[in-house]
Image (spheres, rainbow, N blue to C red):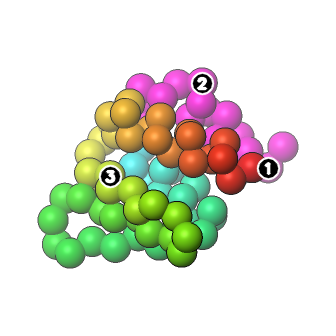
Amino acid sequence: MSKKEKLIEAIKNNPKNVRFEDLRKILENLGYTASNTGGSHYVFTKENATSLTIPYKKPVKVIYVKQVIKIIEEES
C-alpha cells in the first residue's frame, strides 16, 4: 500500500482529525490546483470539475473532509 493510499484510508477512518496539508496533497494528486488570494480560504479547481473552497484551519471541519472523500470516490 502506497503512502497516498494510507493517507486516504486514514482520512476515511477519522474525518474529524484531518490536517489541511493532507487534503491539499490528495487534491493536488488528483489534478486540482490550489489558489489563494490572500485570505484564509483556498479554492481548488480542476478542468471539467466543480471548484471546492476549503478554509485553512487545523483541523479541517468534517463537512469539507467529506466533500474530499466524495471526490476521491468519484475519481477512482
Q: Is residue 21 left or right of residue 40?
A: right
**Mark 3 — residue?**
54
The quadrant holding residue 53 is bottom left
Of the image marks 3 and 2, the number of the one nearer the N terminus = 2
**Amino acid beneath label 1:** Ser
Label 1 and label 3: CA atoms lie apart by 25 Å
Reading the image, the residue beneath label 2 is 13
Location of mark 1 (residue): 2
The reply to whether the magenta stretch includes residue 62 is no
When asked about the image quadrant of residue 45, the answer is bottom left
Task: Report how far apart the C-alphas of labels 3 and 2 lie in the structure.
Answer: 20 Å
Q: CA distance from mark 2 to mark 1?
A: 17 Å
Residue plotted at (68% across, 53% down) = 75
| Residue segment shown in magenta | 1-18
Count every numbered label the image shows and give the total: 3
Residue 33 position (above or below residue 67): below
